[in-house]
Amino acid sequence: MPGPFTLAQIASQLGGRVVGDRQILIRQVGSLAQAGGGQIAFLSDARHRSGLSATRASAVVLGPEAEASTALPRIVHDNPYAYFARVSQLFNPVTAQPAGVHPAAIVSPSARLGARVSIGAGCVIGDGAAVGDDTCLYPRVVVYHGCRIGARGIVHSGAVIGADGFGIANEGGRWLKIPQIGGVSIGDDVEIGANTTIDRGTMDDTVVEDGVKLDNQIQIGHNCRIGAHTAMAGCVAVAGSADIGSHCSIGAGALILGHLSICDHVNVSADTVISRSIRKPGTYTGMFPFDDNESWARNTAVVRQLAKLADRVRALEKRAQGQGGGDG
Amino acid sequence: MPGPFTLAQIASQLGGRVVGDRQILIRQVGSLAQAGGGQIAFLSDARHRSGLSATRASAVVLGPEAEASTALPRIVHDNPYAYFARVSQLFNPVTAQPAGVHPAAIVSPSARLGARVSIGAGCVIGDGAAVGDDTCLYPRVVVYHGCRIGARGIVHSGAVIGADGFGIANEGGRWLKIPQIGGVSIGDDVEIGANTTIDRGTMDDTVVEDGVKLDNQIQIGHNCRIGAHTAMAGCVAVAGSADIGSHCSIGAGALILGHLSICDHVNVSADTVISRSIRKPGTYTGMFPFDDNESWARNTAVVRQLAKLADRVRALEKRAQGQGGGDG
Amino acid sequence: MPGPFTLAQIASQLGGRVVGDRQILIRQVGSLAQAGGGQIAFLSDARHRSGLSATRASAVVLGPEAEASTALPRIVHDNPYAYFARVSQLFNPVTAQPAGVHPAAIVSPSARLGARVSIGAGCVIGDGAAVGDDTCLYPRVVVYHGCRIGARGIVHSGAVIGADGFGIANEGGRWLKIPQIGGVSIGDDVEIGANTTIDRGTMDDTVVEDGVKLDNQIQIGHNCRIGAHTAMAGCVAVAGSADIGSHCSIGAGALILGHLSICDHVNVSADTVISRSIRKPGTYTGMFPFDDNESWARNTAVVRQLAKLADRVRALEKRAQGQGGGDG
């Protein structure tokens, strides 16, 4: 483990403004609630300011708006969360697995592995697949034949890259399989969560561009494109042939239907189903509200009568208008 | 790779009507957008007709309604999508893994393997399990003890067949496990996607009938029956003891609750929760619409007041009626 | 397999009141529908009482309210479902895998394994991880470095314990990874389903307390706490830093958003999104109702106009009030 570093040393490497004792020694990061001596915590959201008074951390990273909320030694930075990420990277390796191919990994002789790759136990790398420099595959990742992962990638256990897309054609009530002869092409600096699956394309590649971050148990269908620097939280499903722009963020459990496109800089809220293309940046939501079970049952009964309810309101309006006068 | 074939040779094998140069040589399939010389593309949906003018494919498969939309050599068929599946199968193997048991697979001595099975690296086949003729298990599939997969099946990486169903009984606030002593019985011609899970039955078998096609990350609970030739898109969840008919299609992310039954020929739309039995063929939907975040927030606030809103409309109607006359 | 036992022997071990032939020999449990001679079935829900008349089971477990519904030898107990769980445990082992470490498992030399653990083929146990006494890991479970599982646990195939939490900070449109240096701490008597993922904490541990039961394909984000004896059905997703109480039950496909807390004894219905903290025990629901596709389309069109509809009702009310009199 690198370090320890003084606050002054940290700021000289990462920027930010030190307030208070510059020489205090930091050995590790910690949470406001659990950090102790020698640890630096952070505050990125002013709503959690109350945690500052109780913390036993030796120092804290925070934004200028919270600078005066503590007497602790501190580093002030406009983006305390990103700053904290860099501080943590200073003390901790980004991946926990040593470089090299584990003897219990199965790598096809025709696969190409970059420099300093780390391939965990139980990984299976298919014929003609490629893994870029400095990429880490944790145990039990499968990369099917011909699929490519770029440099500095991180793929967590159980992820499956390049299984067949779901291509079936109905003929007289039975399903014919459409061979999936495309591949998967994953850019640089991509992280892929545990048990996430990315299907190979039907004929062309499924594409995941540089800097994409995918959480666990995400499903990316065949022929999709996921634009650069887009992030998806856990359990998102993207159906086949969807085209998602760059710098998007997709909330947990959201579902993007197939054959549609989403432009750059779109935020999709958790649990939202995107059922048509989005051409304008912004935040889109479609989460059904929860309630205590009784209220839900009462309100939901009306949902199934909404069209009739709207008709009844229209009839009342017509009648009111027919009566003339009024304030309308 | 088989081929090349002329259009005439393809049509003599698969049917369809050739229009234009019958002798043109085809080596592979391709998408309208990416295909080049020697490739055959297809058009199954007239809405994508614009792709025809720009394609550099050597030939195309299409339906009679689009026959006149291109001067390219073409094969005309009533079901161009299914036809294309067959053309692609002509040029490409349906599975990419050679027959045989990979040395890094773990197969119980009491498991029964059919002829020409293909068992990938890292697969685990439990005691007394059975895998039928010509079935392909990609790397890292687990088949628990006593579970059976039929002939010509395809199971993708990370799938787990026969883990314990979720059988727990509450006793004074603690959970007792109910041993799951049933198995899983999977028919012929079934495809199972990556990281899909099918639980063993509590006492009887969980049953997946012939010709079922399951995409990735699907969860099938214990004691379910999935009827023949039913297809499910990614991330569908089927709770325990659901009985789903034949020739159904279940959209991505749909949820079928437990202990209910769905008749044959039912289509469930994506993201729909089936909360009671369905006894009539047809299409069923329950997707909450998304909107820009502001509109969503405004409309959703009313959802939680719907029962009251309906009461207020009723009061207005009563009042209007009380006033007599009107146009009602 | 233990047994056979007479009804009298079963009741002397597990309690309950025998009615009818006490000496009948039972060799195994079975379902009402499929059980034959020598098998004992159960009825836990009076709605399934019709199954009693047709069963060929030799005996049945049921509650006092159904005691008179059959002439079969029977054991009457207030909690027939829990009683049945115990009867089944009498005849069947709770886990199907022998104790010991499979030669095809990869266990770090620095991992600590308790007595009588069962570690299946293809499992990977990281540096400094710990697995408690009598815990069974089915094939292909991954336990990342430093994560701990308590005693008497059961973890099904494909589960991943301790992959990195989804910690990323945005800096100028790119994502910085926040090293995930916490672990996962799992209590005693916890069951974890196939392909379920539990992420390690950012700095502190993700905590799963004693007696928790998790079905398949569940995702637990970093820094969460899942309180003791809480059960979650398949495909639940819990976002980061959620704090869930004890004795909760979470229905299939539900989504718990991050940074919120749920008190003890809360039931969340299937497919419900919990988007704010819950401080009162009870049942909470947010499932959007399904309908035939046409009715759904009609009603859903109104959902997107609900705020306007409410405004129109308000206008009508105002107008009605302006007309004075009435019955309001």
Image (spheres, coloured by chain):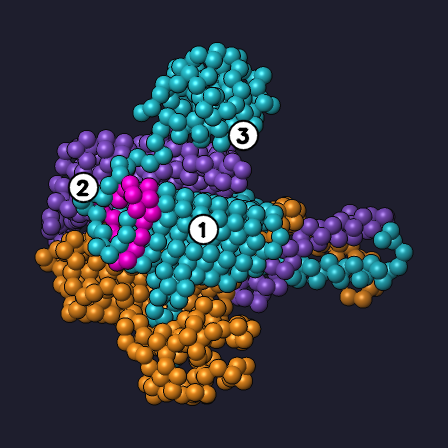
Chain colours: A purple, B cyan, C orange
Cα distance in 3D space between marks 1 and 3: 25 Å
Cα distance in 3D space between marks 2 and 3: 42 Å
Instruction: Give the vertical position of C134 relative to B272 (above or below).
Output: below
Question: Callout 1: 10 Å neighbours few (<14), some, many (20+)?
Answer: many
Cα distance in 3D space between marks 1 and 2: 33 Å
Instruction: Identify the secondary structure beneath mark 3.
Output: loop
Tell me the subunit letter for badge 3: B
Going by the numbered disc 2, the residue's amino acid type is: Ile
Q: Is residue C172 left or right of B322 when viewed as pictured?
A: left
| Sooner in the amino-acid sequence: mark 1 or mark 3 | 3
Residue range of the region highlighted in magenta in the rendering: B114-134
Pick the quarter of the image with the N terminus of chain B.
top left
Give the residue number, with chain letter if any, for mark 3: B79
Question: Callout 3: 10 Å neighbours few (<14), some, many (20+)?
Answer: some
For image coordinates 54% across by 58% down, the residue present is: B261
Q: Is residue B291 left or right of C197 when viewed as pictured?
A: right
Is residue A163 shown to the viewer in this render?
yes
Give the residue number, with chain letter if any, for mark 1: B209
For image coordinates 54% across by 66% down, the residue present is: A293
